[in-house]
Amino acid sequence: MQKRWNGKVKIVTGIRRCGKSFLLNTLFKQRLLEEGTPEDSFVELALDRKTDLQFRNPSVYWRRENHEKDERCRVLCRDVAP
């Protein structure tokens, strides 16, 4: 948690079914919410779902979501493998 906002992407890796998504989408997100992070600052993507496949191209996502706010955004993305 001390390395937040240092300009680097944080990546959680591990074997299948070891709890990566639980860590990210439950524990990490809950901690940020408890610290006062607004719920609408989270972007959650599961790139293995057909509904999110289009967002493998970040430009498509950015245009679709109309990011005009000058606020920090937390992108929680899982299943990035090709």
Image (tube, rainbow, N blue to C red):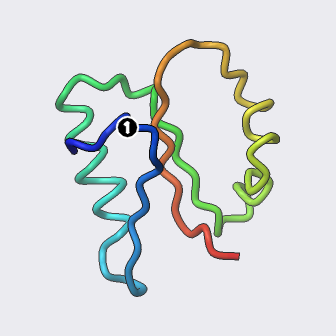
Describe residue 71's horizontal placement relative to residue 54 as left or right.
Answer: left
Residue 18 image position (x, y, % from top left)? 31, 81
Identity of the residue drawn at 66% across and 22% down: 67
The residue closer to the viewer here, 6 or 67, is: 6
Residue 16 image position (x, y, % from top left)? 42, 85
The residue closer to the viewer here, 72 or 22, is: 72
Residue 20 image position (x, y, % from top left)? 35, 69
Describe residue 65's horizontal placement relative to residue 75 as left or right.
Answer: right
Counting every numbered tag in the picture gives: 1
Q: Determine whether the residue tagged by mark 1 lies in a helix, strand or loop.
A: loop
Residue count near mark 1 (Cα–Cα under 10 Å), binned few <14, some 14–19, many ≥20: few
Identity of the residue drawn at 41% across and 54% down: 10
Q: Is residue 64 above or below residue 36?
A: below
Describe residue 58's horizontal placement relative to residue 1 as left or right.
Answer: right
**Where on the picture, by quarter, is residue 53?**
bottom right
Describe residue 73's horizontal placement relative to residue 38 as left or right.
Answer: right
Per the image, the residue denoted by label 1 is: 6
**Where on the picture, by quarter, is residue 50?**
bottom right
Residue 39 image position (x, y, % from top left)? 38, 28
Q: Quadrant of the C terminus?
A: bottom right
Q: Quadrant of the N terminus?
A: top left
Amino acid carrying label 1: it is Asn
Q: Is residue 51 above or below residue 38?
A: below
Identity of the residue drawn at 45% across and 27% down: 41
